[in-house]
Image (cartoon, rainbow, N blue to C red):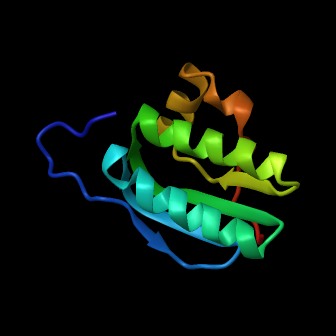
């Protein structure tokens, strides 16, 4: 999803621990940082929630990173969930069929 002529805001990772809130545009430029933050959180917590309420735009690469992180978490006996995706983000999740590979919470909840 693109935003026309507006300048993209690289995603920021807000918070730590079992709940990571992403704010901004989650795209290929920030997948490495997000992957590292998720992996670090999963070392210390059995369940991690990535809150997408602050993400207006996302690309397919970013969604694939979340799906892959969820698979890695499950193999290690942990859980990764995404929470509160905006309508456009949710739409791409469904169009790409990646929603089937993710635990999705419709409303943000404590981790």
Residue pictured at 72% horizontal, 47% vertical: 72
Query: Which quadrant of the figure contains the N terminus?
Result: top left
In this rendered view, identify the residue nearer to me: 64 or 7. Answer: 64
In this rendered view, identify the residue nearer to me: 64 or 3. Answer: 64
Instruction: Judge whether residue 61 can be spotted in this image.
Output: yes
Residue 61 relative to residue 90: left or right: left
89 is higher (above) or lower (below) than 33: above
Identity of the residue furthest to the right in this view: 77
Residue 59 relative to residue 41: left or right: left
Residue pictured at 60% horizontal, 62% vertical: 38
How many numbered marks appear?
Answer: 0
- The picture places residue 69, in percent across and down from the top left corner, at 65, 48
Query: Which quadrant of the figure contains the C terminus?
Result: bottom right
Residue pictured at 60% horizontal, 25% vertical: 94
Residue 83 relative to residue 53: left or right: right
Residue pictured at 54% horizontal, 43% vertical: 65
Instruction: Judge whether residue 105 can be spotted in this image.
Output: no
In this rendered view, identify the residue nearer to me: 49 or 45. Answer: 45
- The picture places residue 41, in percent across and down from the top left corner, at 66, 71
Residue 31 relative to residue 47: left or right: left
64 is higher (above) or lower (below) than 80: above
Q: Quadrant of residue 30?
A: bottom left
- The picture places residue 15, in percent across and down from the top left corner, at 55, 79
């Amino acid at each position: 999803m693109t935003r026309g002529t507006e300048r993209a805001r690289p995603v920021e990772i807000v918070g730590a621990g079992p709940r990571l809130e992403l704010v901004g545009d989650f795209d290929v430029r920030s997948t490495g940082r997000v992957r590292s933050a998720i992996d670090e959180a999963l070392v210390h917590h059995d369940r991690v929630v990535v809150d997408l309420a602050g993400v207006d735009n996302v690309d397919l690469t970013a969604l694939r990173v979340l799906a892959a992180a969820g698979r890695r978490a499950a193999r290690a006996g942990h859980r990764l969930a995404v929470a509160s995706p905006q309508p456009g983000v949710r739409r791409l999740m469904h169009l790409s069929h990646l929603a089937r590979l993710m635990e999705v919470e419709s409303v943000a909840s404590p981790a």
